[in-house]
Amino acid sequence: MKNIMILFLLLPLAVATMSFAAAMVNWQNYTDSKGGYSVSLPGDPYVTTNKKVHYASASIEADGNDIGFYVHWKAAKKLSGSKIQSEGEKFMNYFGIEKQSFPSPKSISGNGFTGYEYNYKSSATDVPISARIIYANGILYHLEVATWDGHCDQAWIDQFFNSFKLN
């Protein structure tokens, strides 16, 4: 019984410590003028491009958890409705270890874009992933938060997604 009481006393302290660690992350604004967007990333962004896809990403370790924040984009012909969803899912599979089946997404819109939000576990690695596919101005964007050790504070995911702005 005494151990249970100690656990209940320490649990709020552990939660407060994790929240404090989340607040200590140094979020930095990154602007990609060629991609036409800006976004906040936790730490210094890593940026690269191959022939088809442009990347900006940042990874952090927090609370013993490795978390990756990614923005990928590529030029895309005019897309609308379900075509955004199907092309977006192909784009997400481009980065996967194996072909992924996706759950039904939630429609999103705002700031001049339309798109879809996904929450799923990778079929190859069992990693929880929150992702958004956004189409605007002839560009298909893929935003993703991958939590390699299983958990990411929802406030971080929201901060990342909500910071995405078209320039």
Image (cartoon, rainbow, N blue to C red):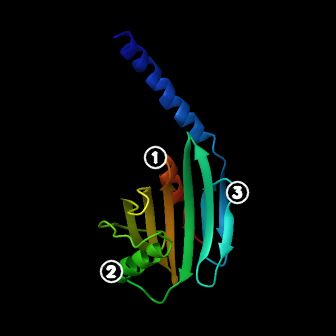
From the top left corner, tell me how far across and down residue 42 is, in percent.
Answer: 62, 52
Q: Amino acid at mark 1?
A: His
Q: Indicate which disc residue 82 carries.
A: 2
Which residue is disc 3 drawn over? 44
Pair 3/1: label in front: 1
Which residue is disc 1 drawn over? 151
> Left or right of 126: which side holds 146?
right
Q: Earlier in the sequence, mark 1 or mark 2?
A: 2
Q: Residues within 10 Å of mark 2 (few under 14, many from 20)?
A: few
Q: Earlier in the sequence, mark 2 or mark 3?
A: 3
From the top left corner, tell me how far across and down residue 28 is, in percent.
Answer: 67, 55
- Count of all numbered marks drawn on residues in the image: 3
- Closest to the observer, 134 or 113: 134
Pair 2/3: label in front: 3
From the top left corner, tell me how far across and down residue 18 is, in percent.
Answer: 53, 35
Residue at left offset 61%, top offset 50%: 60
Separation of marks 3 and 1 at Cα, in angstroms: 21 Å
Q: Amino acid at mark 3?
A: Asp
Residue at left offset 45%, top offset 89%: 78
Q: Outermost residue, left direction?
A: 104
Callout 3 secondary element: loop
> Left or right of 162: which side holds 56?
right
Q: Amino acid at mark 2?
A: Ser
Q: Residues within 10 Å of mark 1 (few under 14, many from 20)?
A: some
Callout 1 secondary element: loop
